[in-house]
Image (spheres, grey):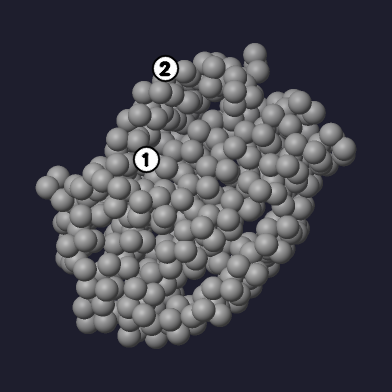
Amino acid sequence: MDRAGFLTKTPVPRLIVKLAIPTILSMLVTGIYNTADTFFVGKISTQATAAVGLVFSVMAIIQALGFFCGHGSGNYLSRQLGAGNNKEADEMASTGFAIALIIGIAVAVTGLILITPLAYLLGASSTTLKDTVDYMRIILLGAPFMIGQFVINNQLRFQGSAMYAMAGLMCGAVVNVGLDPLLILVFDMGVSGAATATVCGQMISFFVLLLGTRKGENIRLSVKNIRFGWHFAGEIINGGAPSLFRQGLAAVSTLLLNHAAGAIGGDPAIAGMSIVTRVMMLTASAFIGFGQGYQPVCSFNYGAGLYKRVKEGFFFCLKYGAIFLCAAAAVCIVFAPHIIGWFRDDPEVIAIGTDALRYQAATLPLLSPVIMTNMMLQSAGKGVKASVTASARNGLFFIPLILVLPGLFGLPGVEAAQPVSDVFSVCLTIPLAWSELKKM
């Protein structure tokens, strides 16, 4: 069966599961990139753990730009493949990749020039400045590879090549996790070793995924297919803006969270909240990977006019995603002290992190309608609605809450800002999902 038949005729539940297994693993790999450094750096000191947490905002911005170009170009090329416009899809793939590399180089150069002021902006103190700068410098050098690998990964995934996309990320993850203890603990490179391991892993993934564009029916990236202009740029913005808002606002919210935590509880509070952020990100990444198995089904079938399959897939993911998140929430609530202690054996860090993890786990199941609605709207090309839903959780609601609640309730206000934001987000999301599903 060719790609069109596979995506339009395979029973929807079976198709989503088949595509979701590799994307779940891919998202877990992405989470491991961020979590492995926190785990091994936690063996050094609380200050080092805090420094890695501070630089997470920069990594989130780099990832946001990668998803912006990857989802923007991937959504469009998938819809064009569904409609039979292969030439348009070829040109979008090469153009999206070229734009991503240009953005990655610009981020690296700008960040390296302004690295010390940027560290202070992120919330570094006199005790964390050196570690923050050392870690961030190497991460910035890897920005073009990080952005590039996210673009190729998503383009392959939207073409139905989820298995190879997963394999590419998996290669980098193995390198990262293998190098972390070697460079940090054996060669005593500290946070610089953690950053080096991460960037090496990203470079391996970049080149493996690049080779994947030459396999089977996959679109081959070519300089001659690059078309800089408003048409493709506009489509990337329309399809990628929700991802940019979602990931970019996550970076801003993390920055504000670190500032609020540091002002009240110092380095232990930053370390505790940073660990919780990584744990929740890793937990949510499995569900996001499940939802990403739905995205090519949604975009391809929407482009082909098969709206019944689009709706069937949405409700299938909504149901089973909620079941998974309920189970994950229960684990986090029951074992919160053990989970935080696994990263950093510091009583103050464990106490702060335990409360925050339990607060956030309590509203974890609400991510099912919020994230699935965002993915459905984005994959169908509904850029404005998708951008609103993408901005809600980490932007529209979280930013005002993190600015207000700590002043009213102190550290509990910091810990409760995200779960309160999740409640508001689901109230906004449901009407937007219903309005679009009625049209189909």
Asked if marks 1 and 2 touch (Cβ < 8 Å), the reply is no
- Please tell me which residue is depicted at 58% across the width and 56% down the height of the picture: 388
Is residue 432 or residue 210 the one in the foreground?
432
Q: Which mark is residue 113?
A: 2
- Please tell me which residue is depicted at 57% across the width and 43% down the height of the picture: 249
Question: 410 left or right of 253?
Answer: right
**Mark 2 closeness class: few <14, some 14–19, many ≥20 residues within 10 Å:** few
Q: Is residue 396 visible?
A: yes
Where residue 179 sits, quadrant-wise, is top left
**Mark 1 closeness class: few <14, some 14–19, many ≥20 residues within 10 Å:** many
Mark 1 or mark 2, earlier in chain: 2
Mark 1 vs mark 2, foreground winner is 2
Amino acid at dot 1: Met
- Please tell me which residue is depicted at 41% across the width and 56% down the height of the picture: 239
Q: Secondary structure at mark 2?
A: helix
Looking at the image, residue 348 lies above or below residue 231: above
Question: 212 left or right of 425?
Answer: left
Is residue 7 or residue 102 the one in the foreground?
102
Most distant residue in the right direction: 408
Amino acid at dot 2: Ile
The quadrant of the rendering that contains the N terminus is: bottom left
Q: Position of residue 137 (x, y in %)?
A: 43, 23
Q: Is residue 331 visible?
A: no
From mark 1 to mark 2, how far is it between C-alphas? 19 Å
Where residue 72 sits, quadrant-wise, is bottom left
Q: Position of residue 389 (x, y in %)?
A: 58, 58
- Please tell me which residue is depicted at 84% across the width and 34% down the height of the picture: 407
- Pointer 1 residue: 146
Q: Position of residue 206 (x, y in %)?
A: 29, 44
Q: Secondary structure at mark 1?
A: helix
Is residue 437 or residue 104 the one in the foreground?
437
